[in-house]
Image: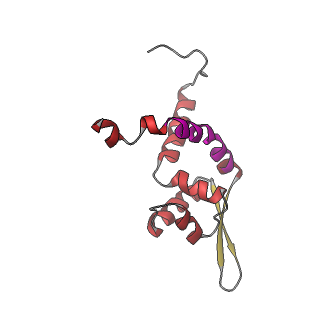
Amino acid sequence: MTDAPDLLHIDDEACRRFLSSAELVGRRWSPGIMLAIGRGAHRFSAIVAAVDGLSDRMAAQRLRELEATGLVERRVIPTTPVQVRYELTQPGLELLRSLQPLAAWAHRWGDVVGEPERAAAS
């Protein structure tokens, strides 16, 4: 494998930050939840409905994590009954935008890469 001279030099602190960010984004359901919110699903039930296979329990857990990291904001609207809405924060929106090239890559190469089980069977 050859070095990639066009890549930025990443020092130890930047590497730690990158790894933390990659682990957050790599958590199951987190990107799907952020994408659902970015596409307009702001209520809990709408988020769960927009992410195929997401349970209420996992949605609540991931939304709490995303809120704790500052990527999602939970807003309580004092109506009767009380409404809760989820919005992407500026960092969350920027993260979602930064994932667009990965989404484009997956669209282009997803058939080749496929699921690990399918690749092993080939």
How far across and how far down the image is residue 1, in percent? 43, 15
* Residue appearing at x 45%, y 52% in the figure: 28
How far across and how far down the image is residue 17, in percent? 55, 37
Which residue appears farthest toward the left when viewing the image?
121
Report the predominant secondary structure element of the magenta stretch: helix
Query: Quadrant of residue 58 in the image?
Result: bottom left
In this rendering, the answer to whether 109 lies above or below 48 is above
32 with respect to 90 (left or right): left
In this rendering, the answer to whether 64 lies above or below 82 is above
116 with respect to 109 (left or right): left
Whether the magenta-drawn stretch holds residue 47 is answered as no
* Quadrant location of the C terminus in the rendered image: top left
* Residue appearing at x 68%, y 45% in the figure: 94
How far across and how far down the image is residue 62, in percent? 50, 59
Camera-nearest residue between 85 and 108: 108
Camera-nearest residue between 55 and 82: 55
Query: Quadrant of residue 36 in the image?
Result: bottom right
Query: What sort of colour scheme is used for the picture?
Result: secondary structure
How far across and how far down the image is residue 110, in percent? 48, 39
Whether the magenta-drawn stretch holds residue 104 is answered as yes
Q: What number of labels is visible?
A: 0
Magenta region, residue range:
93-109
* Residue appearing at x 50%, y 37% in the figure: 19
